[in-house]
Image: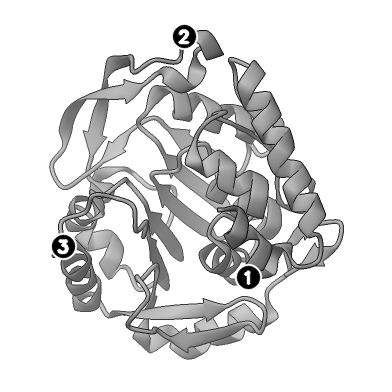
Amino acid sequence: MLMRAWRHPVTRSDRLGAYARYLSWKLHASVVSGPVLVPFVNETLLLAEPLSRETRELSLLVLKDPEAMAFVAHFLRGDEYFVDVGASIGSYAVLAAATADACVSAFEPEPGRAALLRRNVALNGLGGRVDCRELAVAEVPGELEAFWSSTRRLPLPLRVATRECASAAVVRLDDARLAGHPVLARVDVGGDELAVLRGANATLGDPSLCAVIVGADPERALEDEQPELVRAVLERHGFVPADYDPWRRRLLRLERTRRTMIYVRQRRAEHIVRRLAEGAGIRVDANLRI
């Protein structure tokens, strides 16, 4: 992770600053039992779980998914609608609302992360733009009984493999009573993205929806065929895989060696390219704007 940060374009203007943020996170995580405060884009802040991988990436890189996060900020415009399924602590939701003045519906079923999501929205004064929903999204509605890790919220001497069980309501995205017609959606639910998409046929078929970002973590225990099934669902609705170069604001043909995160509606490609080129920048830190 440290070598990745050293070589990464996001840190090239201030590598020492990136390492200082990382050391600050490590220090706080070792002594604090509650959330740590992490600097984020456009002078926003995020409360984050002290030992999570997400927090480590936010501390080092700020933009934990640089291409996908830059796509969100460059594409969205004021008052447009973004749906974030698997919002976690709200990095994408805060990004969209703070950099583009977009409106967001953010779905997160895990109680601890949902609480941090709400706190981060309030902390950054975005309550009028981000609708936080403590719900799981899948193909079949009902109720989810799951074990959520509690170790990250325990004091250091007590961090053992304890878990707590909690239930969450499950909705189909098509039944979720969205606040409008989303122009952009993100689905990142730890390996169950296919189930979310299968319950979102009407949403995916809405011509207003220009692009979908799908979680793509190589360390996840995904079934081998799931990425291809996800791709098949999205291609059936007219979306094609793409890559994005945020430094040159260019939408690129996807390299087969990379796991797909961004899918764009093919017939809106020219519109998307134009919007990306004209979008407002992101202030990553005092020395870097993308």
- What x and y, as percent, mark residue 251? 51, 84
Res. 76 image quadrant:
bottom right
Residue 183 seen from this side: yes
Depth order, front residue of 92/135: 92
Does dot 1 land on a helix, a strand or a loop?
helix
Depth order, front residue of 170/25: 25
Q: Earlier in the sequence, mark 1 or mark 2?
A: 1
176 up-or-down from 164: above or below: below
Tag 2–tag 3 contact (CB < 8 Å): no
- Mark nearer the viewer, 1 or 2: 2
124 up-or-down from 216: above or below: above
* Residue topped by disc 1: 74
* Residue topped by disc 3: 224
Does dot 3 land on a helix, a strand or a loop?
loop
163 up-or-down from 139: above or below: above
* Residue topped by disc 2: 158
Q: Residue at x 69, y 51 (%)?
A: 98
